[in-house]
Amino acid sequence: MTQFDALCANDPELSELRTAIREFLAADREEHGWEPAVDSWLARWDADFSARLADAGFVGLTIPTEYGGRGLGHLHRYVVTEELLAQGAPVAAHWFADRQFAPSLLSYGSDEQRQEFLPVIAAGRLHAAIGMSEHDAGSDLAAVKTRATQVDGGWSLSGTKVWTSGAHLAQRIVVLARTSPLDPDHRHAGFSQFFVKLDSSGITIDPIVQMGGDHHFNEVTFDDVFVPDADVLGSIGDGWRQVTSELGFERSGPERILSTVTLISAVIKALPDDTDDGTAAAVGDLVARMISLRQLSISVARTLAGGEDAATRAAMVKDLGTRFEQDSVELAADLLDRVDRRTPEAAQLAELLAVARLHSPLFTLRGGTNEVLRGVVARGMGVR
Amino acid sequence: MNELEQLVADIGGRALEARQGRAAFPDAFDEQLWRNLEETGLSRLISSEDAGPAEAAVVLAGLAGHAAAVPIAETDLLATWLAARAGVEVPESGPLTVALADAELRDGTLRGTAHDVPWPHSSAVVLAARTADGLHVGLLTDGPTAESINLAGEPRGTFAFEVGADTTTSLDAQIADELTRRGAWARCVQIIGALDAARDLTVTHTSERIQFGRPLAKFQAVQHSLAEMAGEIERARAATQLAITAATDYGFDSAATDYAVTVAKVATGRAVESVTTIAHQLHGAIGATVEHRLWLFTMRARSWVDDFGTTMHHARRLGRLALAADDPWQVVVSCPEPR
């Protein structure tokens, strides 16, 4: 194995895994007929696909084998994730459980919780939503007002969460709530996390429909919802640290670069072979941005996998990567101008482009706005 | 910092301090620095086979980060290597350079003009004349026919030459490609060094300069510009690291290195645009004067972008690779086989 292959996340073991997931996806698509989508990790929910993917061994890769996972490393997960995104596969159903909830359980979960949930996550059959943002707590997450008060045998949860992707389809939601009143001198203290059943009594789920008519976001209202002690995630009062400590992987992952990759690949494929020099240079520019971002993203993943800190560079990946995703939409549109509009590919491309345009404002918002991320980078540079 | 990085930083730092007393423009060859590089063995590090591309990159980036006025890439990575390949003898010490040109071979005479030859008054100028049937390598004994400077004031020369083909060695045209690749590789590494220095100067300046009663760096708009600058550099560094690694693993004469250098040249080229713009914006007008150091780095980076193939040239090459691929995603993931 060469270091070059390692930097490309392509050393023999990863390369083998890459081939395996590609073969699975090609065969699955052939049989089940899903179409590559833009922004599939947010927008394409397909519980059957998630189950098939897991049955083939491609979900829960970093979950230890004793809990039904594959017991592999973060880079293995990286490779599978990027291939899923590159093919625009419908991964939304298991996405948050696999990306967020599984690592949280492994770090903070009780043994009973791990036994109960990790095997279901690895089986691709746990669908979870994330309840973080609120009407008055967007970029300023510490302004969360949802509160949990202790009652006999558990907690009573009240408040309203917004932008919870897939809450209308999911079984559980991870809720960040205040368990002690706000201390203005220690705003990050007094938070806790709860893993709440979405069919609990007292929960109302209302759709938030996107421009273009899509529904994946929701407003979730909790009105004295009883949460048993067994569903407290981690330690009471430690919620802020639990939520923020593993942001590195989330911020630097392939989904911060590749939300539009299906559009980019399709438009490049549709261009004629004898395309002019100017267009070739535009393609090269686009591809160079992608490759260099992916290199940065992998380099952060390797640092994190080695147990070292990469918070500043992870924030950079998300800032640069999501801006690239946004820019790529109009760059692809410019390239599309060179594609013969009468071909079936052109019609398909126009559809991908339309979805990309509708989704692109969200790229630089979700999971922490770019303004917040640049603040993180500035702090890392010692000026803030 | 490892030992080599520390050594380069020490030598480079002293040279940068010594600049204070020198005329700022145009730039002149730094003899004292060159002596120090020769004494420490850094001037011919990779060509003496004591070290590989990774070590060469440390020297190139470290010296660029101190605006070293010496042809280190030209000597160590290009001229010495090319002369050795061709069996052409060059002085064992002193700075060297390469004059790369398209030439015409008629009646046993090579005619052509090499433009923008860096450091044209080096101890030896190795001619690399590309003709229809290969690469002719020899020595140019006359001085430049015209002289100029690049944006940073570094000397550049034009050599209109007419030499007997029998005084040159004929090599495969592929060697010319490798020469260009080595040059582009070196410029990417040097650009990263220069951009790092520009960023450090900008952080320092905005932390010290007080306006409206507080340091500029306390303004959020300024912080965001600093973050953008740092991000662009890290992205370019990641691409350049892949090129360094490719050269270490596969050598400069490989498809993997060709791929990675092509990517890195585009990535660094694009980074230079935004990083130099932000660095100058945040410095205010003082940053665009000869008395301030900033331009030593921004204008070197800006000039180097155009050396050994422009950003557009490399973007076009990468674009053609992606257009020819069955699946463009494969070009993103790695260098297409065979390597």
Image (cartoon, coloured by chain):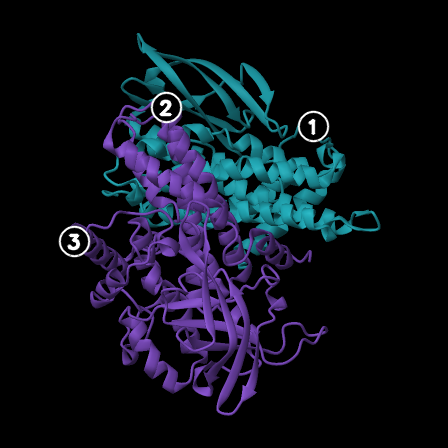
Chain colours: A purple, B cyan
User: Tag on residue B25?
Assistant: 1
Please determine whether, in this image, residue B159 is positioned above or below residue B94.
above
| Dot 2 alpha-carbon crowd within 10 angstroms: few under 14, some 14 to 19, many 20 or more | some
Cβ atoms under marks 2 and 1 closer than 8 Å: no
Q: Which element type, helix, strand or loop, lies under badge 2?
A: helix
Amino acid type for the residue under numbered disc 1: Phe
Q: Which element type, helix, strand or loop, lies under badge 1?
A: loop
Q: Which element type, helix, strand or loop, lies under badge 3?
A: helix
How many numbered discs sit on the rendered protein? 3
Q: Residue at x 45, y 66 (%)?
A: A205
First of labels 3, 2 by sequence position? 3
Q: Residue at x 35, y 28 (%)?
A: B176
| Dot 1 alpha-carbon crowd within 10 angstroms: few under 14, some 14 to 19, many 20 or more | few
User: Tag on residue A27?
Assistant: 3
Q: Residue at x 78, y 47 (%)?
A: B209
Q: Is residue A364 left or right of residue B29?
A: left
Q: Residue A369, position in %: x, y?
A: 56, 54
Q: Residue B279, position in %: x, y?
A: 65, 40
- Choose top left, top right, bottom left or bottom right for residue A292: top left
Depth check: give the residue in front, B241 or A280.
A280
Q: Chain of mark 2?
A: A
- Choose top left, top right, bottom left or bottom right for residue B131: top left
User: Tag on residue A277?
Assistant: 2
Q: Chain of mark 1?
A: B
User: Tag on residue A113?
Assistant: none
Depth check: give the residue in front, A99 or A216.
A216
Please determine whether, in this image, residue A263 is positioned above or below residue A54.
above
Q: CA distance from mark 3 to mark 2?
A: 36 Å
